[in-house]
Amino acid sequence: MAIQHTRFWLNFPPQLITRPLLWELSKEFAVVPNIRQASVTDEVGIVSLSLEGEADEITRAIAWLESEGVKVDPVEMNTIAS
């Protein structure tokens, strides 16, 4: 299968901010996470995340994040972004 790169916005609720979910994700699934941007406070964590891997593995990883309580939204790409 072909490797793809997909970007997402992740919104972490307060109870998940200190949990190493992206590390857990990288151990559980055959994906390579790359944090592109992040803003973390005591109330919320917002992360722009790029995932590299096979499409089905990325889908499984995103479903897992959502099951853990992370809100996941795709990044809208424009013609300038790469």
Image (cartoon, grey):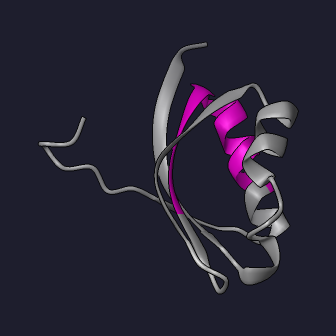
Instruction: Name, please, the residue furthest toward the front.
Output: 42
Nearest the viewer among 66 and 23 is 23
Figure disc tally: 0
Q: On the rendered structure, is 12 left or right of 8?
A: right
Q: On the rendered structure, is 41 left or right of 9?
A: right
The percent position of residue 30, horizontal first and vertical second, equals: 75, 25
Q: Is residue 20 magenta?
A: no
Instruction: Name, please, the residue furthest toward the top.
Output: 1
Above or below, comparing residue 82 to residue 61 in the picture: above
Above or below, comparing residue 34 to residue 22 in the picture: above
Residue lying at 71% horizontally and 79% vertically, measured from the top left: 13
Residue lying at 82% horizontally and 79% vertically, measured from the top left: 15
Residue lying at 59% horizontally and 78% vertically, measured from the top left: 41
Q: On the rendered structure, is 12 left or right of 67?
A: left
Above or below, comparing residue 8 to residue 25 in the picture: below
Q: Is residue 55 magenta?
A: yes
Residue 61 figure quarter: top right
Above or below, comparing residue 16 to residue 43 in the picture: above
Residue lying at 84% horizontally and 65% vertically, measured from the top left: 68
Quadrant where the N terminus is found in the figure: top right
The percent position of residue 37, horizontal first and vertical second, equals: 43, 53
Residue 56 figure quarter: top right
The percent position of residue 82, horizontal first and vertical second, equals: 25, 34
Instruction: Name, please, the residue furthest toward the bottom.
Output: 43
The percent position of residue 74, horizontal first and vertical second, equals: 46, 57
Nearest the viewer among 4 and 15 is 15
Q: Which residues are magenta?
A: 47-64
